[in-house]
């Protein structure tokens, strides 16, 4: 299918062209076409017997820090090999064209920035950064002592990835700005997320409540689908460049 074969509702095109303030929430689906496995994908190889939701918690790290560090090392290697795809690039271009554009992501892979997006609200942190498990302060370097995970140079505690785990609070400032953008936008795009994990999943509903129109881009239905103004069933890599083309 060429992009011109995708038919888009006229009202959607009008909303897209007429909106000065657009907010976008992305999830793992947008990075799937870059080869980064989705959070709820069955994990492969060594990790096939684990459920990601059982590894991404402070309790899991306390119980078995080496296991959790190893899982993140595996995910970091996948992210390092991945490159941004047409969906990420289209959002970076939208930021350049729309004055009131806000990109909110649940992804920790940093691909939006690598695609050229300048302002990204990373609600769940970034896998390429580390922090001290005990102090919460960023750790950029450590001495190689053979310890896995490595040790914080200040306090000697374990280093962990700077991501948000289940049961942890989101970065306050990013969440506040995300809420503000969702409540203040005219059009909200919800791209590649299963819309299951709070508080991110509530953002499109905040937008709807404040009178915005909501467009979902996802090959599958989600709990948001029945509430969305429009739902485009397709991949981010196909749909987002098409939306940009028709702007
Ligand atoms: P999920 O893995 O739950 O959902 C990915 C969504 O992307 C699904 O709805 C897919 O149908 C859709 N999808 C698949 N391929 C796609 C494509 N090419 N284009 C567009 N959509 C596609 O990932 P998230 O919704 O991001 O949180 O998960 C949200 C949070 O749940 C994660 O950030 C993580 C997890 O718990 C934490 O770790 C705190």
Image (cartoon, grey):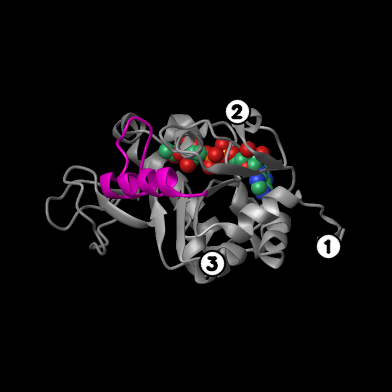
Q: What are the residue bounds of the magenta stretch?
A: 164-186
Which of the two discs, 2 and 3, labels the residue nearer the N terminus? 3
Q: Quadrant of residue 44?
A: top right
Given residues 189 and 147, the one toward you in this image is 189
Find the distance from the CA under tag 3 to the CA under tag 1. 21 Å
Comparing labels 1 and 2, the label whose residue is closer to the camera: 1
For label 3, count other residues whose C-alpha is less than 10 Å away and answer few (under 14), some (14-19) or many (20+): many
**Residue under pointer 3:** 92
Find the distance from the CA under tag 2 to the CA under tag 3. 27 Å
Q: Residue at x 73, y 57 (%)?
A: 238
Q: Quadrant of ligand 1?
A: top right
Mark 1: secondary structure: helix
Comparing labels 3 and 1, the label whose residue is closer to the camera: 1
Is residue 103 found left or right of 33 in the rendered image?
left
Given residues 178 and 206, the one toward you in this image is 206
- Quarter in which the C terminus is drawn: bottom right
Location of residue 157 in the rendering, given as x and y in whole percent from the top left corner: 18, 46
**Residue under pointer 2:** 223
**Residue under pointer 1:** 4
Location of residue 72 in the rendering, given as x and y in whole percent from the top left corner: 44, 48
Q: Is residue 208 visible?
A: yes
Given residues 141 and 20, the one toward you in this image is 20
């Amino acid at each position: 299918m060429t992009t011109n074969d995708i038919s888009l509702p006229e009202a959607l095109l009008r909303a897209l062209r007429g909106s000065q303030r657009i907010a976008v929430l992305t999830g793992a689906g947008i990075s799937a076409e870059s080869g980064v496995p989705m959070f709820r994908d069955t994990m492969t190889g060594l990790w096939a017997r684990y459920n990601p939701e059982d590894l991404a918690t402070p309790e899991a790290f306390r119980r078995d820090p080496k296991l959790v560090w190893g899982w993140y090392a595996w995910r970091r290697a996948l992210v390092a090999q991945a490159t941004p795809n047409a969906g990420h690039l289209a959002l970076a271009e939208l930021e350049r064209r729309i004055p009131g554009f806000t990109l909110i992501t649940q992804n920790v892979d940093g691909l939006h920035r690598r695609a050229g997006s300048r302002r990204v609200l990373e609600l769940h942190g970034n896998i390429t950064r580390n922090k001290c498990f005990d102090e919460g302060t960023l750790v950029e370097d450590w001495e190689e002592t053979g310890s896995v995970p490595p040790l914080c140079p200040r306090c000697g505690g374990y280093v962990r990835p700077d991501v948000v785990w289940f049961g942890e609070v989101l970065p306050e400032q990013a969440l506040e700005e995300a809420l503000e953008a969702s409540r203040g936008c005219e059009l909200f795009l919800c791209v590649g997320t299963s819309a299951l994990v709070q508080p991110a999943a509530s953002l499109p509903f905040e937008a709807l409540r404040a009178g915005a129109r909501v467009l979902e881009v996802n090959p599958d239905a989600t709990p948001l689908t029945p509430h969305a103004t429009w739902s485009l069933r397709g991949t981010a890599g196909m749909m987002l460049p098409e939306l940009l083309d028709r702007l």
